Image (spheres, helix red, strand yellow):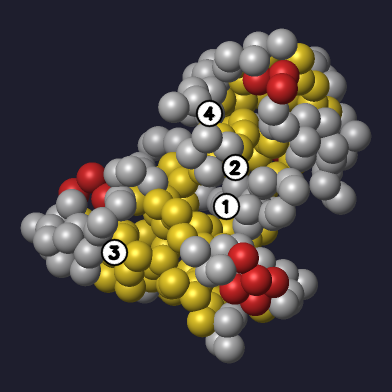
Amino acid sequence: SYVLTQPPSVSVPPGRPARITCGANNIGSKSVHWYQQKTGQAPVPVIYNDSDRPSGIPERISGSNSGSTATLTISRVEAGDEADYYCQVWDRSSDQPVFGGGTKLTVL
Amino acid sequence: EVQLVESGGGLVQPGRSLRLSCTTSGFTFGDYAMSWFRQAPGKGLEWVSFIRSKAYGGTTEYAASVKGRFTISRDDSKSIAYLQVNSLKTEDTAIYFCSRGPRLQLWAFDYWGQGTLVTVSS
């Protein structure tokens, strides 16, 4: 089965950029989606198809995908960005979604 | 406004059953696939199941961990998706979320409910 690998945690001071990676074999050939989940809340999509922002998501949040790594970037981190972030792709061989293990973003 | 509200969770003994409901509004329910996910305490998201729209046969898919024990269904007339969970195990303890999707061509999940907690314990 297809496995997505995320770092368990990332810590960044406010105002600095945060980069959260999602690694997998040839992930650059797939469409990657990202979800933000704040404590006690439902997940919210923040990036579709590698780099498309849903309406209402600030321009500070962006995504890229190439080779074996997809990256979610928050250009200037704010306290309100503290959350768990999950990457997701669709595994066509099993016709199922695959999620990364999640990365906890801490704003120092 | 799109809304999804889960219900039916609770404390249940191992081996027993529950039926979870996902009541929706704000969109044409019958046009969309619907999914269930779960999140064990302190753990990540786990996809559980999805059901396609009737236009795509209303067929279902399940994660290996629940196949044979869980059954997803839908009532388009009521805009509700269900998850029947049988033969519950302690490791099924989790918050269960429903979501709209996967969206065709996108293969992502755009709206989520707030979840319902299932606790399996004797």
Question: In the image shown, does A94 or B20 lie closer to the viewer?
Answer: A94
- Residue at numbered disc 4: A100
Mark 4 burial class by Cα count in 10 Å: few <14, some 14-19, many 20+? many
Amino acid residing under circle 4: Gly
Amino acid residing under circle 2: Gln
Distance (Cα) linking label 4 and label 1: 16 Å
Farthest residue, direction bottom: B77
Numbered disc 1: what chain? Answer: A
Task: Report the disc number at residue A37.
Answer: 2
Amino acid residing under circle 1: Ala
The N terminus of chain B lies in which quarter of the figure? bottom right
Distance (Cα) linking label 1 and label 2: 6 Å
SS class of the residue under badge 1? loop
Question: In the image shown, does A88 or B55 lie closer to the viewer?
Answer: B55
- Residue at numbered disc 1: A42
Mark 3 burial class by Cα count in 10 Å: few <14, some 14-19, many 20+? some
Distance (Cα) linking label 3 and label 1: 21 Å
Going 23% across and 45% down the picture, which residue do you hit? B91
Going 38% across and 46% down the picture, which residue do you hit? B63
The lab-note entry on whether marks 4 and 3 share a chain reads: no
SS class of the residue under badge 2? strand
Numbered disc 3: what chain? Answer: B
SS class of the residue under badge 3? strand
